[in-house]
Image (cartoon, rainbow, N blue to C red):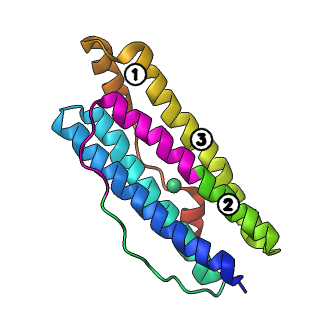
Amino acid sequence: MIKEKVELLLNQQVTHELYSAQLYLSMSSWFSEKSLDGFAKWYYVQAYEEKAHAMIIYNYIIQAGGRALLEPIKAPPHEWDSVMDVLEETVKHEEFVTSLIYNIVDVARQEKDYKVDQFFQWFVNEQVEEEDNVNKNKGRYETMGKDGKALYLLDQELGARVYVAPPLLTTMEA
Ligand SMILES: [Fe+2]
């Protein structure tokens, strides 16, 4: 059985992941409006990934004999000052998500829920990748993205991203 304290945090995390999807879809739309279609695609794919994270945690709650008590998802911002503003907010948001994941692992250990501790190691590693990706996007924009031609190339490159379902989701959906 899943521990009550852990179940509550997992439920909250489903909502956090769905909010991440809302946030990134809103950012995607902002980029589309600016005709930065590659950035828009990157964020659109990211929104899908966040939904997949939510579904993975939802599935875990159900498999562990818990109940998914879904909460409202707050509205994301719709406007940002600049491309750099979006990239910086994305880095901040991913750092926040990492802190949430670490807290789940901390509480799971305190509650001796070693299954959740082990299960969430995938998310710990995923966050290393997420933070690396968004820091790279920001860094590359900073060093090469601002003049028109370089921005065009960066936009093209980001637009090549394709959605790949996370392995945990694939296993659970199979
Ligand atoms: Fe996520």
Q: Which residues are magenta?
A: 76-97
In the picture of the structure, the residue carrying the numbered disc 3 is 129
Location of the N terminus by quadrant is bottom right
Q: Amino acid at mark 1?
A: Tyr
N-terminal-most mark, 3 or 1: 3
Above/below status of 64 relative to 158: below
Tag nearer the camera, 3 or 1:
1
161 on left or right of 11 = left
| Residue 103: numbered disc | 2
**Image quadrant in which you'd find residue 72:** bottom left
Q: Which mark is residue 141?
A: 1
| SS type, badge 3 | helix
**Residue depicted at x 73% and y 68%:** 107
Q: For the residue carrying disc 3, how many other residues have a C-alpha within 10 Å: few (<14), some (14-19), or many (20+)? A: few
Residue at the extreme front? 81
Residue 6 colored magenta?
A: no
Q: How far, Cα to Cα, is label 3 from label 1?
A: 18 Å
Image spot of residue 119 (x, y percent): 70, 65
Question: SS for tag 1?
Answer: helix
Task: Pick the quarter of the image with the C terminus.
Answer: bottom right
Number of marks drawn? 3
Task: Indicate which label's residue lies in the foreground, 2 or 3.
Answer: 2
Q: Is residue 96 magenta?
A: yes
Instruction: Identify which residue, 5 or 2, lies in the foreground.
Output: 5
Picture residue at 59% right of the left edge, 72% below the top: 10
**Callout 2: helix, strand or loop?**
helix
